[in-house]
Image (tube, helix red, strand yellow):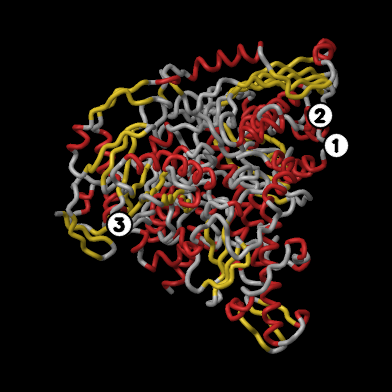
Amino acid sequence: MIAIKVNGKTYNLDVDPGMPILWVLRDKLGLTGTKFGCGAAQCGACTVHLNGDGIRSCISPVSRAIGKEIVTIEGLDAKLRKPLEQAWIQEDVPQCGYCQCGQMMAAAILIRDKANPTDEDINDAMTGNICRCGTYQRIRKAIHVAANLKKQTIK
Amino acid sequence: MSTNKIGRRNFLKNTAIAGGGLVIGFVIPGIADAKQIADSTTRFVPNAFLRIGSDDSITVIIARTEVGQGISTTLAMLIAEELDVRPATIKMIQAPAAKEYVNIFFGFQSTGGSTGAQAEIDRYQKAGAAARSMLIQAASNRYGVNAEECRTEDGNVIIGQNRISYGKLVDDAAKLPVPAAEAVKVKDPGKWKFIGKNYRSIDTLEKINGIAKYGMDIQFPGMLTAVVDRGPVLGATVKSFDATKAKAVPGVIDVVQIPTGIAVLADNFWTAKLGRNALEIQWERGPNANRDSKLLLEEYRKFAATDVQTITKAGNIDEAFSKADKIIEVEYDLPFLAQTPMEPLTCVVKLSPDKCEVWTGTHNPEFDQLAASKITGLKLEQVFINTVYSGGSFGRRNTNDSHYVKEAVELAKASSNKLIKVVWTREDDVKGGTYRPVFLHTAKVGLDKNGIPIAIKYTLVGESVVIGWQYEKMIMTGFGFDFTVVSGIVDSPYLKVIPNHHLGYHLTKNTNSVGSWRSVGSSHTVFGIESLIDEMAHAAGKDPVAYRRELLKGFPRHLAVLEKAAKEARWGEPLPAGRARGVAVCEAHGSYVAQVAEISVSPDGKLKVHKVVCAIDCGLVLNPQAVRAQVEGGIVFGLTATLYGEITFKEGKVMQNNFHDYRMVRMNEMPVIETHLVPGDKMGGAGEAAVPHIMAAITNAIYAATGKRIRKLPVFAGDWKKSTINL
């Protein structure tokens, strides 16, 4: 049995410790907001937070999460989620939308850590996330918007 | 994905077959159990496109598959406009397989060719307008007033001071006769509140909070996941296999042979994949066993020189060449390209003795239904295709042979487990075919002493994407050749203005590994012709925009987008050292597009794309926001192909695997994209229209910056790690 904490809830699971976190989330816990895009840490669609760090859940064995806390798109803190959602809607970011949960999870860490992310910060934080629909320009703009919204909420 | 040109030619015939624009009826034939997509509050189903509930809920059935092109919001807007409701209040459902939802440009239920909005505008407007007139009639009957005294506003019928919500009228409205399509009057465009104005996608929130269910996300209790080994070579078949080690993997439930290969089933993807890794299979490698991309090109050169079908010709090219002041002879090479939508292919099947249910992202639910019916022996009405959100497609889910649906149905049939989901890995996807075919273009141009072309011989060699498919008959009987291969050049204004011309095509052998790739024929023809025009301009010593302007003077829509893009990109104004601009202009999918790319090349050959300015005239714009999104997306898609896109074969095997060696443009390489909408009359498509131009715009800019002419795509061909140009 492996005990893991996901979005604040503890689960005891009878799974192979080598099973990637992605498939535990999706196929064992039914949390399908975390997406399978490449299985090789190339696209970022599977991005989740492990103890606050952005990780590629498709190559991270669940054993890595023992004693730690996983946050998925379904459990993202409202302080980060709300400004990101509002910005993504305002900038009309998604097309097919499949990569966007991963984009949001990567962007959440960026706006958490940097109050005023520059375009260079955005390149550094987001280059690991592929969007085949090509929404990068809108993602960039939405991150700037979200960072501003987050500051307004704090005030 | 076909082209709208074909659609237009077949429009009258197809509409006659399909029975007219608006399909009226309270009972929807083809949906045996209409309740499957209606809930208990639904009372008013005025037609196949719209349902209104007693709780005021408004549901629009989206006939075209949403793959990210935004068609669902656009179609909902059309109904909302006529019905007088806010589009954002509408719930959208993807249409099941049923004849009501045929694409009237094609005559069958298919999403492609960037036809969605053009084909559906009439039906959706009339669906909304018919429902509105019936709700007004219901209200006027109830209150004993003339219909003329009623108006509608935001989901209510208004009579004097009374506001009656649509939900309160649906029981009465449902008893009224549905007006005939020709009697339904739609709004005057001058009164449009939503159409023509920016409207954000209605479904954004569910896509960004993890709620939206893509095919990959469909789960049921007891469902098993299958991963299939389809062999090392496209078209390989199983000679023999040993499943002992696969079955020994803890959690593997079954190993099943199906026509496409060997499937391993488990209660989760990861275990099924471990099981697949443990399979031992002997393969019959089949017809593609020795395929080699390098040999293809040599073969194609021979065809270009010896065996060409005339597509269009005029004058006498040989005589004109002999009189030419200058001759240009070049060839352009384009590789196989994979679509790689972010969501790999997936298909869920639930099979019982009297029912087959399918959940998948697909462009062609009607074909899938037919395919599943043939495999299972069930009647069409016993097969239910649930089209779900697609994590992109770009042509990948427009298979027409329904191969990934067939495979999943075959598995459910062969296995003792009747509720299964087949999941493709990214490697399965990259290696799994339906590629944009390899093309060789050869061109010879004769210029007079002023640099004006007097003769052109242009020859294409490559595979057709329609041979053997459902589109084949429609396309080949209409034109005598595959129009989709030559679109972008067969109707090129440049051919028209060059008095002596010959456009030829050699159709190469069908290898069952090609398919639709966003912008189809234009994805290769526009690169060729727009590179060639640039070469001609430079040979003539003329500015590339000025040269095009001269040739395009009788083509106002081409000219308007060219002028707009050039102006907004400040064409001709000086740039810092190392920077340059390149231009391309062409019609694609009924829309007229010009792009100017601004790039720089460092002394050691490092390329940076700074900015792309695009002008598009797609006629009537239903939602400018959506058109801009498609232009941006199309340019990024085309840019990825320009720089990196290349599928190669060696000893039959596809050499690429995943996003590390089939590279994508990423955030750090993203240019600024500026989109300008140019007004025009006849409506064109948006989803594919802006894809191909960027290829020539970039290579033309590279020439302007460095003097190096790139005639082979991708720019960084041959090595996926490459990111500098050999100067």
Q: How far apart are the alpha carbons under marks 2 and 3?
A: 61 Å
Residue for point 40% across, 64% down: A80
Q: Is residue B23 above or below residue B475?
A: below
Give residue B527's position: percent from left, percent from top. 64, 30
Q: Secondary structure at mark 1?
A: loop
Labelled pair 2, 1 in contact (Cβ < 8 Å) = yes
In this view, the mark in front (3 or 1): 3
Instruction: Please tell me in which quadrant of the rendered image residue B510 appears.
Output: top right
Q: Name the residue tied to disc 1.
A: B554
Would residue A7 appear left or right of B549 to someone viewing this image?
left
Image disc number at residue B221: 3
Residue B128, how many percent across, how many down?
A: 67, 66
Furthest residue to the bottom? B161
Crowdedness of circle 2 by 10 Å Cα count: few (<14), some, many (20+)? some
Q: Chain of mark 3?
A: B
Residue B577 seen in this snapshot: no
Mark 2 and mark 1 lie on one chain; the one further toward the N terminus is 2
- In three-dimensional space, the C-alpha distance between marks 2 and 1, rounded to whole angstroms, equals 10 Å
Q: Amino acid at mark 3?
A: Pro
Q: Nearer the viewer, residue A14 or B402?
A: B402
